[in-house]
Each structure stands twice: as C-alpha cells, then as structure tokens.
Amino acid sequence: MPRILVVDDDPMVGATIEVLLLRQGFDVTLTDGGETGLAALEAQTFDVMLVDIFMPHMRGFESIRIFHERAPAIPLIAMSGYAFASSASPSPDFLRMALELGATRCLRKPFTPEALLATIRECLGESAPPKDQKEAP
C-alpha cells in the first residue's frame, strides 16, 4: 500500500485529501504544516509527498526546497491556490518555480479528485522500479 505524506495548513483541504486517498487504499499521514511534515518525513518512509506551497512558518518555497533536499528520491507534488501568472498580471508563476526547486508535479487548487489521483499515480510510476527488476533474483 503506497504511503502518502500530505502537508497542508488548511484543515478542510487536508481532511478532504486524506479521506479521498484512504478510500483509494493509500496509507496517508496528514500534517498541518512544514515543521510537522518534516518530522513525519524523518520518522517514516513515504512513496509520494503532497506539499502546499504557502504555509505559515515556512515562507513561500522554503518548504518545497527543504522537503526535496531531505528526500530527493521521493516524488513531491506541490499544491497552490496561487498558481499561475497571467499575461495581464506581473505576478510570478508559483508552480513553475516549485518545479525548479524540486517538485515532480504541481496541482493548482482547487483540483478534482481525478486530477489528484492521476498525478499521484504518475509519480508512483516514476518512482517505482520496473517490474522485471523487482522479480529478478
């Protein structure tokens, strides 16, 4: 059963993701911020990390950078409601920046359950060794 670390300071978002993933058979650890997420990462192993970009106490992209540095082999999905720059606005493209800091994939909030599950499955496929290697003596 794949283990997913969810790091989001919004309790409703975190709980919604947790319920969805549990119903799909994932083992989920939900944390409410960067510090508790890092503590969970040090205590357990995970197959995928879902990390909100903007949380209190870890400004901006600090959380993405630190999570990636601590566990570079674990796919990291960055999430943000403040995701994309538009041509009419000089605001930065936060999800593109997250990719540059080590995120494997990005999701713009709000996202659908289908988009979340497809992204997680893509990451699991990328992080898992090919089946023939698992079966080799």
Image (tube, helix red, strand yellow):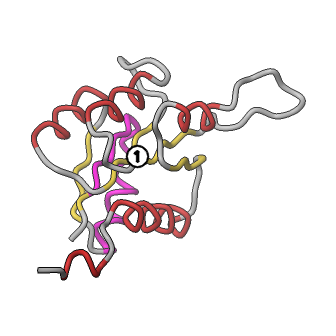
- Picture layout, residue 100 above or below residue 107: above
> In this view of the protein, which residue sits in the foreground, 122 or 14?
122
- Picture layout, residue 57 above or below residue 10: above
Identify the image quadrant of the N terminus.
bottom left
Q: What's the magenta bit mostly, secondary-structure-wise?
A: helix
Task: Specify whether residue 51 is painted magenta.
Answer: no
Image point (55%, 38%), residue name: 99
> In this view of the protein, which residue sits in the foreground, 69 or 35?
69
Image point (44%, 38%), residue name: 52
Relative image position of residue 123 (x, y in whole percent): 42, 60
Quarter location, residue 134: bottom left
> In this view of the protein, which residue sits in the foreground, 7 or 96?
96
Quarter location, residue 57: top left
> In this view of the protein, which residue sits in the foreground, 97 or 27?
97
Q: Residues within 10 Å of mark 1 (few under 14, many from 20)?
A: many
Residue identified by numbered label 1: 76
What residue span does the magenta drawing correspond to? 4-24
Q: Residue furthest front?
A: 137
- Picture layout, residue 104 above or below residue 32: below
Q: Secondary structure at mark 1?
A: strand
User: Relative to residue 97, is residue 117 drawn left or right?
Assistant: left
Image point (28%, 49%), residue name: 5
User: Relative to residue 100, is residue 1 drawn left or right?
Assistant: left
Relative image position of residue 120 (x, y in whole percent): 43, 62
User: Relative to residue 125, is residue 18 drawn left or right?
Assistant: left
Relative image position of residue 85 (x, y in whole percent): 75, 32
Image point (62%, 31%), residue name: 94
Relative image position of residue 9 (x, y in whole percent): 37, 34
